[in-house]
Image (cartoon, helix red, strand yellow):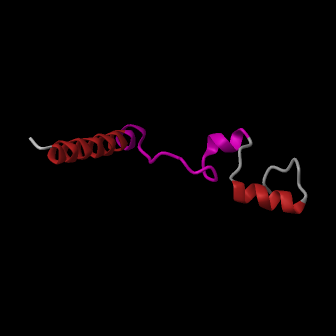
Amino acid sequence: MSTWLITFLVGVGAVAFFVVGLSLTLMIKGHNLESEIETNREMRKRGIRCAREQEILDARGCKDCNGK
């Protein structure tokens, strides 16, 4: 086989692997991954904020606010 065909098949296989992995995550957990900092409950519990929200709080002069 030629090298471009092997490269193409490896690429298709890698994409298929990631699609199956994300589908299994969705089926097992029942929801999409919470990758956004702004909406992730666990990050909010730890006090981690997105850069946009942090800039707004810094502009207000709020050092120890909980985001409200």
User: Which percent across, then down, holds residue 36?
Assistant: 57, 51
Q: Quadrant of residue 16?
A: top left
Which corner quadrant holds the N terminus? Answer: top left
**Left or right side of 17 for 32:** right
Residue occupying the point 17% across, 43% down: 3
Q: Nearer the viewer, residue 47 or 58?
A: 58
**Left or right side of 31 for 24:** left
**Left or right side of 6 for 57:** right
Residue occupying the point 20% across, 48% down: 8
Report the span colored magenta: 25-46
As drawn, the residue found furthest toward the right would be: 61
- Inspect the magenta stretch and tell me whether residue 53 lies in it: no
User: Which percent across, then down, holds residue 51?
Assistant: 71, 55
Q: Nearer the viewer, residue 20 or 12?
A: 12
Q: Quadrant of residue 61?
A: bottom right
Residue occupying the point 88% across, 62% down: 60
User: Which percent across, then down, holds residue 4?
Assistant: 18, 48
Which corner quadrant holds the C terminus? Answer: bottom right
**Left or right side of 24 for 63:** right
Residue occupying the point 87% across, 47% down: 64
User: Which percent across, then down, holds residue 27?
Assistant: 35, 41
Q: How many marks?
A: 0
50 in relation to 13, above or below: below
62 in relation to 26, above or below: below
- Inspect the magenta stretch and tell me whether residue 35 lies in it: yes
As drawn, the residue found furthest toward the front would be: 2
